[in-house]
Image: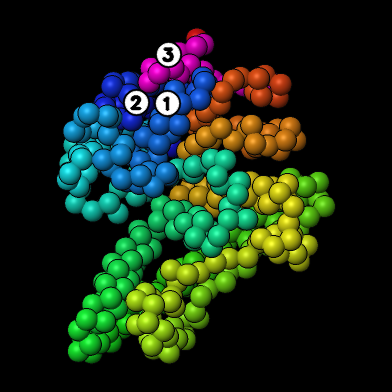
Amino acid sequence: MYIESVELKNFRNYASAGIQFHPGINLFYGNNAQGKTNILEAVYLCGTTKSHRGNKDREIIRFQEEEAHIRMMVQKEYRTCRIDMHLKKNKPKGIAINGIPIKKAKELFGTTNLIFFSPEDLHLIKNGPGSRRRFLDLELCQLDQVYLAQLSSYQHILNQRNRLLKEIRHAPKMADTLDVWDLQLVQYGERILRMRRKFLEELNETIGKIHQRLTGGMEQLSLTYEPNVGEEAFARNLFECRERDLKLQTTTAGPHRDDFCVTVNGMDLRKFGSQGQQRTAALSLKLSEIVLVKEKIQDTPILLLDDVLSELDKNRQKYLLEYIENIQTLITCTGQEDFLENKFQIHKIFYVEDGKVCLANG
């Protein structure tokens, strides 16, 4: 699997752009704030329907424009797939696959498999539980349409329940309807818990070996799921927390408060790990994703590296570059020095300046 090309119109700082990618390593360099990351964002958005930055569609559309378009051509299993995305300021985005509009985002998942790695991901270990839940959800949603459907339903019901908790303060009789929402929340929540647990178990089988290589055999890394509630006890915990939920006007129990623990040689990195250990563990997580996706889809994912090399020391840079040698990768950086020093082959180099992309080699 690889991306052949992407076309942008009124996307971020791009009035219009067309980029032909190489199936190997593609480097985008230039000064800061010129639009390098925007290219990676467009690819990720076109493959997942969501921006890795979490922005709303209206914030992505070029200033003073009403609409933006992305077209991405993906080569997969000897066939080419065209994804068109139409972003509008005041309406839901429109998506079409090979010219056929789709109604639900889940129909897009599986068309491409993307792994995004940014400097923020290097802080995944020391950040709060929300960052680690997002890591789980982003990858699981790409790998499993069932999980995507379960998570979407859970979040919808959670929002409805939280709204109801606020309304009950002014209309106490509405408390009788809480049981209906609780039943559905537990139904979807239990499935999410099981699927997250399985995913982390599978990831655990891979990450230990990768981390040992990264640390020269000095560290043994392990992941432990820390669900906010147990699968069998979710219904009971939700009921026991009802009085507190009504007081706080929010749902305090459920998988939306999950976390997972990353330990090295038995030590919790969230609390006791050095910055170097935390960053190495985050790198191991991302590299493990690549292995797991390969196994799941029997193909290679596409890797998006947003200015990550500048945040890693030389040894970790070298290991990462060697690891991605046979994977289509889009890399952004301010200069080419890191690649020249590592004597790493780059198949296509682009220079980015003020929303314009030009080929710098070949």
| Image-based side of 296 in relation to 346, left or right | left
The answer to if 190 sits in the magenta stretch is no
Residue 323 in the image: state x and y as whole percent.
Answer: 64, 37
**Dot 2 corresponds to which residue?**
13
Amino acid at pointer 3:
Cys
Q: Give the residue displayed 81% in from the left and 51% down from the top.
A: 217
- Dots 1, 2 in contact, CB < 8 A: yes
Q: Position of residue 96 (x, y in %)?
A: 21, 41
Drawn side of residue 106 relative to residue 28, left or right = left
Q: Is residue 59 left or right of residue 349?
A: left
Q: Which residue is mark 1?
A: 35
Q: Nearer the viewer, mark 3 or mark 1?
A: 1
Rounded to the nearest whole Å, what is the CA distance between mark 1 and mark 2? Answer: 7 Å
Residue type marked 1? Gly
Residue 116 lies, in percent from the top left, at 49, 42
Q: Secondary structure at mark 1?
A: loop
Name the residue tied to disc 3. Answer: 358
The quarter of the picture where residue 244 lies is: bottom left
Residue 254, which numbered label? none
Q: Quadrant of residue 325?
A: top right
Q: Earlier in the sequence, mark 3 or mark 1?
A: 1
Span shown in magenta: 343-361
Q: CA distance from mark 3 to mark 1?
A: 12 Å
Q: Is residue 232 visible?
A: yes
Q: Is residue 344 magenta?
A: yes
Q: Tag 3, which secondary structure?
A: strand
